[in-house]
Image: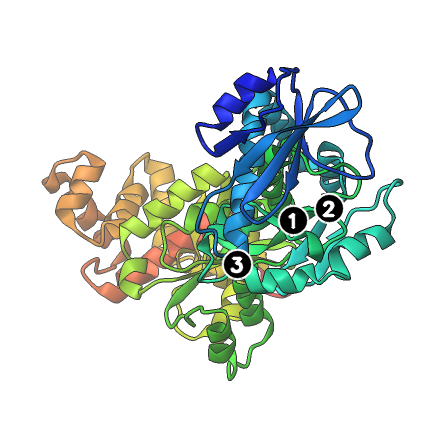
């Protein structure tokens, strides 16, 4: 773009005073800060701050710096941050006039795609190549977490730019704070006296939660418009890579580690205090969930996916990894636990996350979390669980059976009435066993059983009377019905464990 049209566009945002000696109209392709150590280049517009409000514009004409005019950043800039914000706005406004958004977005998209699978060092190195300057990561305490190293710039140079000049202290005073909420979304240029040269500082956040800062000192290339347009988006990619690779802990990850505390420390005397430190309420009614990937997902990936899916659905969720297994703790009342909506919600989550959830029994003591985990682990080893959501309480009978050392002796515990009915159906081609099974599942309700069997109620009564005649069992007695229902569960357990049950096989009499 030619210089005069560029100035006219700039004048729609800032007050621009054109130098009366300005007569030429060269082509401008880049905008950058003046660097005394760098020779002037053609097609560049140079910025030189003269005060907190005024910035001098110049360009190179036949090797000499030609003044263009002054830009007034605005009146009433009473704070350093306000002036820096306007200075950056000037740089970005000029850059948006010169650069195609498609080119900038393409570079960011490529970095974001690589960051999905690449480690943090690879992502940081790619960001350094895009910005043509080294980068440093500073945590919320003002400490240097990591910094890039290039062949052109050694660690000493970065130390002089970032550490020696107390940028960390400056961030503590001017960074994330209740009185500077704009730092969540803005990029700032640090004061020159704080560094060896101008800096770009952009916040790093995990969602809306601040985790640190990305700092780019202009040590290799002068601060320019392209860097200003890139760094905020690069900061978002870097933040994601830091969290993904667990390099920078987040408040959210610290909260999730409370679940590991419940799983490893069984004495709960300090649980309330440690939960309070993370501003998390110690649950008094909860379930533990073992999360198994059905696709080829690493536990960390499944953890992040479940955090995303569970957080909007439940008031408080802790999702962590324990012994290479993804686990979640959901505070929930007993009433809500027994509602069908809870089961439906978990079903939806499993479809979206492509996983299986094994839900512990409802419990009220945080100290019982490890016991809940143990029950989930044993339930996961059973062959009787079906579906994407399995409740441990539905498998308690099978869990008890699985603790029996000798599978061969279990058929002895099948009620003799059921054994007789199985033989009778086999010899007479009747359906007394299926009828009794449905009757017991329907909690001995005649109307519901008849509907499920598609038979007339009188037909059902005749079958039940026949069963009583053959076995002598009173099907109106609750204890008798419980024993028969337990036998059905035992028979199902044996079948699912591929035990070849036959009526004519004798019961073992010794181990």
Furthest toward the front, the residue is 20
Mark found first going from the N terminus, 3 or 1: 3
User: Which numbered tag is attached to residue 135?
Assistant: 2
Q: Left of 301 or right of it: where is 392?
A: left
Q: What label does residue 459 carry, if any?
A: none
Question: Is there CB contact under 8 Å for labels 2 and 1?
Answer: yes
Q: Secondary structure at mark 3?
A: loop
Residue 292 in sight: no
* First reached walking from the N terminus: tag 2 or tag 3: 2
Query: Within 10 angstroms of label 1, few (less than 14), some, or many (20 or more) residues?
Result: many
Mark 3 closeness class: few <14, some 14–19, many ≥20 residues within 10 Å: some
Measured as percent of width and height from the top left, residue 202 is found at: 59, 47
Picture residue at 72% right of the left edge, 59% below the top:
144
Quadrant containing the N terminus in the rendered view: top right
Residue 98 visible in image: yes
Residue 58, position as x, y percentages in the image: 66, 29
Depth order, front residue of 150/397? 150
Quick check: 61 above or below 149? above
Q: Give the residue displayed 53% in from the left and 17% down from the top.
A: 5
Q: Is residue 330 above or below residue 14?
A: below
Badge 2 crowding class, 10 Å Cα cut-off, few under 14, some 14 to 19, many 20 or more, is many
Q: Measured from the top left, where is residue 346 in percent x and y? A: 39, 47
Q: CA distance from mark 2 to mark 3?
A: 19 Å
Q: How is the image coloured?
A: rainbow
Q: Nearer the viewer, residue 491 or 342?
A: 342
Residue designated by label 1: 214
Tag 1 or tag 2, which sits nearer the N-term? 2
Foreground residue, 144 or 166?
A: 166
Q: Which residue is mark 3?
A: 176
Q: Image point 76% across, 34% down: which residue? A: 129
- Left or right of 112, for residue 364: left
Classify residue 351 by image quadrant: top left
């Amino acid at each position: 773009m030619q210089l005069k049209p560029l100035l006219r566009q700039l004048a729609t945002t800032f007050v621009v005073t054109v130098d009366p000696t300005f007569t030429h109209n060269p082509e401008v392709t880049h905008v950058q800060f003046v660097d005394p150590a760098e020779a002037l280049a053609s097609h560049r517009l140079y910025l030189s701050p003269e005060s907190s409000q005024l910035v001098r514009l110049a360009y190179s004409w036949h090797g000499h710096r030609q003044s263009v005019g002054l830009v007034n950043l605005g009146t009433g800039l009473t704070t350093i941050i306000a002036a820096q914000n306007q200075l950056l706005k000037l740089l970005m406004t000029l850059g948006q006039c010169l650069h195609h958004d498609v080119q900038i977005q393409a570079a960011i998209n490529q970095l974001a795609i690589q960051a999905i699978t690449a480690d943090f060092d690879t992502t940081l190195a790619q960001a350094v190549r895009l910005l043509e300057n080294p980068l440093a990561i500073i945590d919320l305490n003002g400490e240097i977490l990591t910094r890039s190293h290039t062949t052109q710039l050694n660690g000493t140079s970065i130390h002089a730019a970032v550490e020696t000049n107390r940028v960390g202290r400056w961030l503590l005073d001017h960074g994330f704070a209740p009185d500077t909420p704009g730092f969540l979304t803005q990029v700032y240029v640090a004061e020159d006296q704080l560094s060896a040269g101008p800096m770009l500082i952009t916040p790093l956040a995990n969602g809306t939660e601040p985790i640190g800062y990305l700092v780019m000192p202009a040590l290799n290339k002068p601060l320019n418009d392209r860097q200003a347009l890139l760094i905020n988006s690069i900061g978002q990619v870097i933040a994601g890579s830091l969290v993904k690779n667990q390099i920078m802990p987040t408040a959210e990850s610290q909260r999730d580690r409370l679940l590991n505390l419940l799983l490893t420390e069984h004495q709960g005397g300090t649980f309330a205090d440690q939960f309070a430190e993370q501003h998390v309420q110690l649950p008094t009614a909860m379930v533990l969930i073992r999360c198994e990937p059905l696709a080829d997902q690493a536990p960390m990936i499944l953890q992040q996916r479940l955090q995303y899916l569970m957080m909007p659905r439940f008031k408080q969720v802790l999702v962590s990894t324990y012994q290479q297994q993804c686990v979640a703790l959901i505070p929930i009342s007993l009433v809500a636990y027994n509602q069908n909506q809870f089961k439906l919600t978990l079903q939806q989550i499993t479809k979206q996350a492509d996983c299986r959830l094994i839900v512990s029994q409802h419990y009220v003591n945080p100290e019982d979390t490890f016991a809940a985990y143990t029950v989930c682990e044993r339930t996961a080893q059973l062959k009787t669980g079906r579906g994407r959501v399995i409740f441990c309480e539905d498998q308690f009978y099978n869990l008890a059976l699985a603790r029996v050392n000798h599978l061969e002796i279990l058929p002895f515990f099948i009620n003799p009435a059921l054994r007789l009915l199985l033989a009778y159906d086999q010899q007479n081609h009747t359906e007394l066993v299926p009828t009794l099974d449905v009757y017991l599942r329907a909690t001995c309700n005649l109307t519901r059983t008849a509907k499920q069997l598609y038979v007339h109620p009188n037909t059902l009564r005749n079958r039940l009377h026949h069963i009583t005649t053959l076995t002598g069992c009173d099907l109106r007695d609750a204890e008798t019905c419980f024993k028969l229902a337990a036998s059905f569960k035992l028979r199902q357990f044996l079948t699912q464990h591929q035990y070849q049950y036959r009526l004519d096989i004798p019961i073992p009499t010794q181990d």
